Amino acid sequence: MVSKKRVAILISGRGSNMTALIDACRLPDYPAEIVGVGSNRATAPGLEIASARGLETFSLAQSQFVDRDAFDAALTQKLDAWNVDIICLAGFMRILTPDFTVRWAGRLINIHPSLLPLYRGLDTHARALADGARVHGCTVHFVTPDLDEGPTIMQAQVPVLPGDTPDTLATRILVEEHRIYPEALCLLASGTLKY
Ligand code: GRF
């Protein structure tokens, strides 16, 4: 096999999608390897999981930097030091600057808990329920300067069931997130996908 793409994952929280990506990358024929995990929150539980899996980690806090450009420049420095080919955002609760997204265009992907273009932004499950949606789901997409707007790579749908709450819906969708994120990364890393 040609050399594996070097992938960094950026997180802010528990890191369950991160773990799904790490597990997929352990498969011998998978076309990507995780080279490290970064966070904008030093206390993100996912960082400990990543360390326990033997991965390098870093955290950067906005308070260390004068503005968002300075933060994103430091982020780029960290990623360049790892020779990163692809960045996977996995619950990274931070809006990246246009400069950053343009620099990484086609190599920066995210998972969002809705069927984009529906329900960009936060609280997607509660909003879908409030609308009486019959189906809901998740999307892996390329990241562009506009929030949750980039081209879709893969989606998965789940039915909204009677009695669903934001939590039950989130739990059902998370199973699909963990399935499609590694599949989407596989497509990108293998060169199957054109941006
Ligand atoms: C996921 O629902 C993801 O779609 C959204 O944030 C959540 C992160 O969960 N962007 P986890 O940290 O991957 O468990």
Image (cartoon, rainbow, N blue to C red):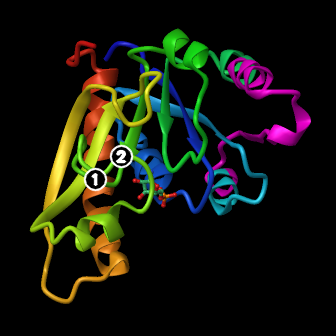
At label 2, the amino acid type is: Arg
Query: Dot 1 corresponds to which residue?
Result: 114
Tally the numbered discs: 2
Q: Residues within 10 Å of mark 1 (few under 14, many from 20)?
A: many
Query: Dot 2 corresponds to which residue?
Result: 120
Residue 56 location, quadrant: top right
Q: Position of residue 38 (x, y in %)?
A: 67, 39
Residue at the (33%, 27%) spot, across then down: 150
Where 107 falls versus 94 (above or below)? Answer: above
Residue at the (88%, 27%) spot, across then down: 66
Please say whether residue 29 is visible from this viewpoint. Answer: no
Where 37 falls versus 97 (above or below)? Answer: below
At label 1, the amino acid type is: Ser
Give the quarter the ligand 1 occupies. bottom left
Question: What segment carries the magenta color?
Answer: 51-76
139 horizontally vs 5: left or right: left
From the viewer's side, name the closer residue of 97 and 15.
97
Residue 2 lies in the magenta-colored region = no
Q: Position of residue 136 (x, y in %)?
A: 19, 61
148 horizontally vs 85: left or right: left
Where 96 falls versus 48 (above or below)? Answer: above
Residue at the (44%, 34%) spot, across then down: 147
Q: Residues within 10 Å of mark 2 (few under 14, many from 20)?
A: some
Q: Position of residue 119 (x, y in %)?
A: 30, 51
